[in-house]
Image (spheres, grey):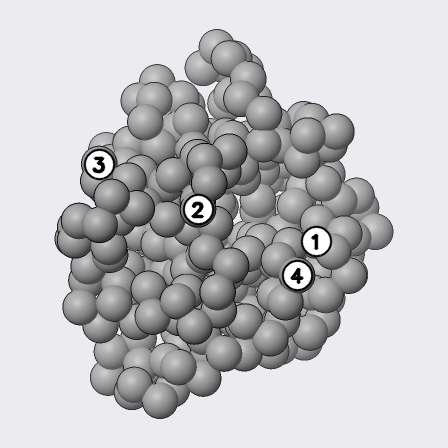
């Protein structure tokens, strides 16, 4: 049976984590830098444990004002320290519940920059490996995040996005470009099915390019995020695809 992981960025103060959690298999939990605090981390970890969802750290730039979506040009050592600090923060919370972290997925601008910046990706991959060599690094398919993690011997999960448009080079269309975010739920589900079942995605330019999907990101900050998560989960079941954590 073909399987796919459904992941969601959580603990970001959207108030819908409890509604989304039943329909996903892994949660990327904000570590307090771009969003969240100790209280939200505890509540989200507890929810994940309740629903049997894998717990992952979601480190981002220390910039709550811009939700971690503003690029910052930091030297590799600072990127390394930034990621290590946030993993440790969530790891401590998880340990308090007798739980263990499963993965790390960078957030926002940190994720997008590292996808195309080898030095930044290498710093993130090394940080993840040094904290816990068993952690899986979630990264954009065919990006430096994936290749850098593989170079240091870490497990990886190729990530695709349900509600984001792609450029022909395989990178995500910048959010400030019109049409970058897919607002129509049916079109987003269609994109997910194509990526999972046919290993392709249609770019914003109209070209069909190959992708490898091990995990699908369902954003938790959308207006109808919970309903959309349920819709994607159901579409997978209808097409014989099981929901399972990667690695």
Q: How crowded is mark 4: few (under 14 residues within 10 Å), some or many (20 or more)?
A: few
Q: Give the mark, 3 or 2, whose residue is nearer the N terminus.
A: 3
**Residue 64 image position (x, y, % from top left):** 73, 32
Q: Mark 1 points at which residue?
A: 11
Q: Name the residue under label 3.
A: 169
Image side of residue 205 versus residue 74, left or right:
left
Q: What element carries label 4?
A: loop
Label 2, label 4: how far apart the Cα atoms are = 16 Å
Image depth: mark 2 or mark 4 in front: 2
Q: Give the mark, 1 or 2, whose residue is nearer the N terminus.
A: 1
Q: Do the residues labelled 3 and 4 touch (CB within 8 Å)?
A: no
Q: Which of 217 and 204 is in front in this view?
A: 204
Q: Quadrant of residue 120?
A: top left
Q: How crowded is mark 2: few (under 14 residues within 10 Å), some or many (20 or more)?
A: few
Label 3, label 4: how far apart the Cα atoms are = 29 Å
Q: What element carries label 1?
A: loop
Picture mark count:
4
Image side of residue 138 versus residue 107, left or right:
left
Q: Give the mark, 3 or 4, whose residue is nearer the N terminus.
A: 3
Q: In which quarter of the image is residue 42?
A: bottom right
What label sits on residue 179 in the rendered view? 2
Image side of residue 219 versus residue 233, left or right:
right
Determine the residue positioned at 24% across, 84% down.
1
Q: Nearer the viewer, residue 190 or 36?
A: 190
Residue 210 can be seen, yes or no: yes
Q: What element carries label 3?
A: loop
Q: Mark 4 points at which residue?
A: 223
Q: Do the residues labelled 3 and 1 touch (CB within 8 Å)?
A: no
Q: Residues within 10 Å of mark 3 (few under 14, many from 20)?
A: few
């Amino acid at each position: 049976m073909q399987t796919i992981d459904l992941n969601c960025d959580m603990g970001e103060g959207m108030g819908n984590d409890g509604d989304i959690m039943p329909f996903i298999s892994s949660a990327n939990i904000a570590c307090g830098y771009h969003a969240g605090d100790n209280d939200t981390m505890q509540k989200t970890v507890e929810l994940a444990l309740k629903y049997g969802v894998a717990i992952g750290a979601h480190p981002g730039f220390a910039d709550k004002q811009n939700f971690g979506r503003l690029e910052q040009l930091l030297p590799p050592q600072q990127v390394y320290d930034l990621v290590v600090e946030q993993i440790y923060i969530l790891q401590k919370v998880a340990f308090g519940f007798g739980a263990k972290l499963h993965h790390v997925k960078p957030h926002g601008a940190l994720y997008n920059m590292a996808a195309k910046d080898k030095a930044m990706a290498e710093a993130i991959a090394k940080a993840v490996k040094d904290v816990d060599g068993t952690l899986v690094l979630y990264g954009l398919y065919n990006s430096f995040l994936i290749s850098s993690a593989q170079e240091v011997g870490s497990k990886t999960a190729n990530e695709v996005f349900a509600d984001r448009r792609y450029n022909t080079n395989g990178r995500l269309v910048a959010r400030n470009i019109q049409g970058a975010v897919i607002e129509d739920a049916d079109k987003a589900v269609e994109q997910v099915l194509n990526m999972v079942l046919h290993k392709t995605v249609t770019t914003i330019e109209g070209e069909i390019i190959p992708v490898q999907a091990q995990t699908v990101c369902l954003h938790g900050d959308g207006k109808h995020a919970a309903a959309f998560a349920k819709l994607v989960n159901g579409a997978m079941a209808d097409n014989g695809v099981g929901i399972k954590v990667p690695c």
